[in-house]
Protein backbone atom coordinates (compact mmCIF):
# COMPACT_ATOMS: atom_id res chain seq x y z
CA UNK A 1 0.00 0.00 0.00
CA UNK A 2 1.23 3.49 -0.81
CA UNK A 3 2.27 5.48 2.21
CA UNK A 4 0.42 8.49 3.47
CA UNK A 5 2.94 11.09 4.50
CA UNK A 6 2.57 13.81 7.08
CA UNK A 7 1.56 17.45 6.80
CA UNK A 8 5.05 18.93 6.66
CA UNK A 9 6.07 16.54 3.90
CA UNK A 10 2.92 17.47 1.99
CA UNK A 11 3.75 21.11 2.53
CA UNK A 12 7.21 20.65 0.99
CA UNK A 13 5.83 18.72 -1.99
CA UNK A 14 3.36 21.51 -2.72
CA UNK A 15 6.05 24.20 -2.43
CA UNK A 16 8.21 22.24 -4.88
CA UNK A 17 5.32 21.69 -7.33
CA UNK A 18 4.55 25.42 -7.24
CA UNK A 19 8.21 26.17 -7.99
CA UNK A 20 8.17 23.77 -10.95
CA UNK A 21 5.34 25.93 -12.29
CA UNK A 22 7.25 29.14 -11.66
CA UNK A 23 5.30 30.15 -8.56
CA UNK A 24 6.97 31.17 -5.30
CA UNK A 25 5.15 31.50 -2.00
CA UNK A 26 6.30 35.14 -2.05
CA UNK A 27 4.18 35.66 -5.19
CA UNK A 28 1.14 34.41 -3.30
CA UNK A 29 2.03 36.56 -0.28
CA UNK A 30 2.12 39.63 -2.55
CA UNK A 31 -1.54 39.13 -3.42
CA UNK A 32 -2.36 38.77 0.27
CA UNK A 33 -0.48 42.00 0.91
CA UNK A 34 -2.50 43.84 -1.74
CA UNK A 35 -5.73 42.50 -0.26
CA UNK A 36 -4.97 43.55 3.31
CA UNK A 37 -2.69 46.60 3.14
CA UNK A 38 -5.51 49.09 3.44
CA UNK A 39 -6.86 47.41 6.58
CA UNK A 40 -3.68 46.63 8.53
CA UNK A 41 -1.25 49.54 8.86
CA UNK A 42 1.70 47.53 10.20
CA UNK A 43 1.39 44.89 7.46
CA UNK A 44 4.59 43.60 5.84
CA UNK A 45 5.22 41.14 3.05
CA UNK A 46 6.99 38.93 5.55
CA UNK A 47 3.93 38.77 7.75
CA UNK A 48 1.80 37.87 4.72
CA UNK A 49 4.24 35.11 3.83
CA UNK A 50 3.97 33.74 7.36
CA UNK A 51 0.20 33.46 6.97
CA UNK A 52 0.49 31.91 3.49
CA UNK A 53 2.71 29.24 5.03
CA UNK A 54 0.25 28.74 7.87
CA UNK A 55 -2.60 28.24 5.39
CA UNK A 56 -0.51 25.72 3.43
CA UNK A 57 -0.03 23.63 6.56
CA UNK A 58 -3.76 22.90 6.75
CA UNK A 59 -4.76 19.49 5.59
CA UNK A 60 -7.87 20.55 3.60
CA UNK A 61 -5.79 23.14 1.79
CA UNK A 62 -3.07 20.64 1.00
CA UNK A 63 -5.55 18.15 -0.40
CA UNK A 64 -7.16 20.70 -2.70
CA UNK A 65 -3.75 21.99 -3.85
CA UNK A 66 -2.37 18.51 -4.52
CA UNK A 67 -5.46 17.54 -6.51
CA UNK A 68 -5.58 20.69 -8.61
CA UNK A 69 -1.85 20.82 -9.35
CA UNK A 70 -1.96 17.18 -10.42
CA UNK A 71 -4.90 17.71 -12.80
CA UNK A 72 -3.12 20.65 -14.46
CA UNK A 73 -0.01 18.52 -14.92
CA UNK A 74 -1.93 15.56 -16.35
CA UNK A 75 -3.79 17.81 -18.79
CA UNK A 76 -0.56 19.45 -19.89
CA UNK A 77 1.00 16.05 -20.56
CA UNK A 78 -2.12 14.92 -22.46
CA UNK A 79 -2.74 12.12 -19.99
CA UNK A 80 -6.44 12.69 -19.33
CA UNK A 81 -9.24 11.20 -21.41
CA UNK A 82 -11.84 13.22 -23.27
CA UNK A 83 -13.87 15.26 -22.71
CA UNK A 84 -11.97 16.38 -19.60
CA UNK A 85 -8.62 16.61 -21.41
CA UNK A 86 -9.76 19.37 -23.76
CA UNK A 87 -11.82 21.17 -21.16
CA UNK A 88 -8.87 21.52 -18.81
CA UNK A 89 -6.24 22.26 -21.44
CA UNK A 90 -8.37 25.00 -22.99
CA UNK A 91 -9.56 26.32 -19.62
CA UNK A 92 -13.13 25.96 -20.92
CA UNK A 93 -15.11 28.82 -19.42
CA UNK A 94 -18.18 26.80 -18.42
CA UNK A 95 -16.07 24.32 -16.47
CA UNK A 96 -16.20 25.67 -12.93
CA UNK A 97 -14.80 22.84 -10.85
CA UNK A 98 -11.47 24.65 -10.45
CA UNK A 99 -13.27 27.47 -8.63
CA UNK A 100 -15.41 25.05 -6.64
CA UNK A 101 -12.31 23.21 -5.49
CA UNK A 102 -10.66 26.49 -4.50
CA UNK A 103 -13.65 27.21 -2.27
CA UNK A 104 -12.67 24.28 -0.09
CA UNK A 105 -9.50 26.27 0.64
CA UNK A 106 -11.16 29.57 1.53
CA UNK A 107 -13.86 27.73 3.45
CA UNK A 108 -11.29 27.06 6.18
CA UNK A 109 -11.54 30.76 7.18
CA UNK A 110 -15.27 31.33 6.93
CA UNK A 111 -17.20 33.98 5.06
CA UNK A 112 -14.43 36.61 4.86
CA UNK A 113 -12.45 34.06 2.85
CA UNK A 114 -15.20 33.87 0.25
CA UNK A 115 -15.34 37.63 -0.14
CA UNK A 116 -11.59 37.88 -0.58
CA UNK A 117 -11.52 35.02 -3.06
CA UNK A 118 -14.28 36.56 -5.18
CA UNK A 119 -12.27 39.75 -5.31
CA UNK A 120 -8.98 38.06 -6.26
CA UNK A 121 -10.76 35.98 -8.91
CA UNK A 122 -12.19 39.10 -10.51
CA UNK A 123 -9.03 41.24 -10.31
CA UNK A 124 -6.57 38.65 -11.65
CA UNK A 125 -3.44 40.40 -10.52
CA UNK A 126 0.21 39.58 -9.92
CA UNK A 127 1.24 36.02 -10.56
CA UNK A 128 -2.35 35.01 -11.48
CA UNK A 129 -2.38 37.43 -14.39
CA UNK A 130 1.07 36.26 -15.49
CA UNK A 131 -0.02 32.61 -15.53
CA UNK A 132 -3.26 33.48 -17.27
CA UNK A 133 -1.41 35.20 -20.11
CA UNK A 134 1.22 32.49 -20.35
CA UNK A 135 -1.43 29.77 -20.47
CA UNK A 136 -3.11 31.44 -23.43
CA UNK A 137 0.16 31.81 -25.35
CA UNK A 138 1.94 28.50 -24.65
CA UNK A 139 0.15 25.13 -24.36
CA UNK A 140 0.54 25.13 -20.60
CA UNK A 141 -2.35 24.26 -18.35
CA UNK A 142 -2.98 26.63 -15.46
CA UNK A 143 -6.67 25.87 -15.06
CA UNK A 144 -6.50 24.83 -11.40
CA UNK A 145 -3.36 26.56 -10.22
CA UNK A 146 -4.70 30.10 -10.70
CA UNK A 147 -7.67 29.39 -8.44
CA UNK A 148 -5.49 27.59 -5.91
CA UNK A 149 -3.18 30.59 -5.72
CA UNK A 150 -6.13 32.97 -5.46
CA UNK A 151 -7.70 30.87 -2.72
CA UNK A 152 -4.50 30.53 -0.69
CA UNK A 153 -3.85 34.28 -0.89
CA UNK A 154 -7.47 34.97 0.10
CA UNK A 155 -7.30 32.49 2.97
CA UNK A 156 -4.06 34.08 4.21
CA UNK A 157 -5.72 37.51 4.02
CA UNK A 158 -8.59 36.16 6.11
CA UNK A 159 -6.20 34.63 8.60
CA UNK A 160 -4.54 38.06 8.97
CA UNK A 161 -7.90 39.77 9.31
CA UNK A 162 -8.86 37.41 12.13
CA UNK A 163 -5.58 38.04 13.90
CA UNK A 164 -5.80 41.83 13.66
CA UNK A 165 -9.56 42.08 14.21
MG1 LIG B 1 -9.11 28.50 -13.23
Image (cartoon, helix red, strand yellow):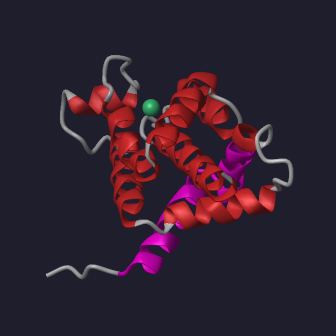
Residue 17: within the magenta?
yes
In the displayed structure, would residue 24 be above or below residue 84? Answer: below
Q: Where does the image place residue 143, in percent across and percent down from the top left?
A: 43, 34
Q: Position of residue 102 (x, y in %)?
A: 40, 42
Please indicate whether residue 59 sits to the left or right of residue 2 in the image: right
Q: Nearer the viewer, residue 38 or 101?
A: 38
Tell which quarter ligand 1 is in: top left
Q: Is residue 78 left or right of residue 48?
A: left
- Residue at x-position 60% and y-position 65%: 53
What main secondary structure does the magenta stretch of the protein show? helix
Q: Which of the 4 image quadrants contains residue 51?
A: bottom right
Instruction: Mark yes or no: residue 138 visible.
Output: no
Query: Residue placed at 43% from the left, 66% from the top?
Result: 58
Name the residue at 65% across, 54% down.
Answer: 160
Q: Which residues are magenta?
A: 6-33
Q: How many marks?
A: 0
Q: Would residue 27 appear left or right of 128 to someone viewing this image?
A: right
Amino acid sequence: MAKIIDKSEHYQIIVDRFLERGVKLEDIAEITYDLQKKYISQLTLELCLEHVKKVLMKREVQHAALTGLELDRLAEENLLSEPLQSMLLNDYSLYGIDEIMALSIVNVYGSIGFTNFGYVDKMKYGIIKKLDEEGKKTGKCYTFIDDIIGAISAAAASSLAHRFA
